[in-house]
Amino acid sequence: MHTGFIGAGIMGHGMAACLLAAGHELTVLAHRNRGSVEDLLARGARETASAAAMACCGARVIFMCLPNSDAVESVVAQLESALAPGTVLVDTTTALPQSTRALEARLAARSVAYVDAPITGGPALAERGELSALVGARDEAFASVRPLLECFSRTVLHMGGPGAGHTAKLLSNIVSNSAAALLAEAYTVAS
């Protein structure tokens, strides 16, 4: 399948490389980390210079791996008017569920599906295709992207409708960060 990838940085590079390794055609958006992009190009990806051009490159599914909701909203605003009906946007960012639900509703009106699929794990797991994806999506959209998510995720969990994946990721972060704080306190008391 022809896929697009926006955000081929520290995490996104491994995810995009896994899509290529699985035989998917890939168009990647130019990124400030040229090393990641050059590596993907050497593996057979094509590059586009702008989000608007990405929307017109023929990719049926476009992945985003961005720093936060503000960045996602900015990129979606650049993509939106040029996206063909039937396109699926997959947001792997750790983002705000309320932003996700608003974007999903807005894009659904244009017959574009929006899937929130934040991932857990680090860059090494991304390179090995061993991440976990916590997915929020309508059933049909989830079914269409699951095989792609499985290219870089050993576990793909459908958490519920739009925004449920981002909600689950934030809850996971709360638990992880709380456990780290508790361990730090315990070691302080122990010493």
Image (tube, rainbow, N blue to C red):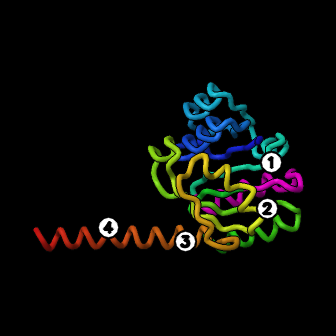
Q: Which mark is residue 60?
A: 1
Q: Residue at x 38, y 68 (%)?
A: 177
Amino acid, disc 2: Ala
Q: Which mark is residue 180?
A: 4
Q: Estimate how packed mark 2 is, as few (under 14), some (14 to 19) or many (20 or more) residues with alpha carbons within 10 Å.
A: many
CA–CA distance in space, label 2 to label 3: 20 Å
Q: Residue at x 45, y 50 (%)?
A: 122
- Please tell me which of labels 1 and 2 falls first in the chain: 1
Give the residue number, with chain letter if any, for mark 2: 113
User: Which image quarter is the C terminus in?
Assistant: bottom left
Amino acid, disc 4: Ala
Q: Which residue extends farthest top?
A: 42
- Please tell me which of labels 4 and 2 falls first in the chain: 2
Q: Is residue 88 magenta?
A: yes
User: Which range of residues does the magenta coloring cover?
Assistant: 68-89
Pinpoint residue 180: horizontal percent, then vertical percent.
32, 67
Q: Is residue 127 magenta?
A: no
Amino acid, disc 3: Ala
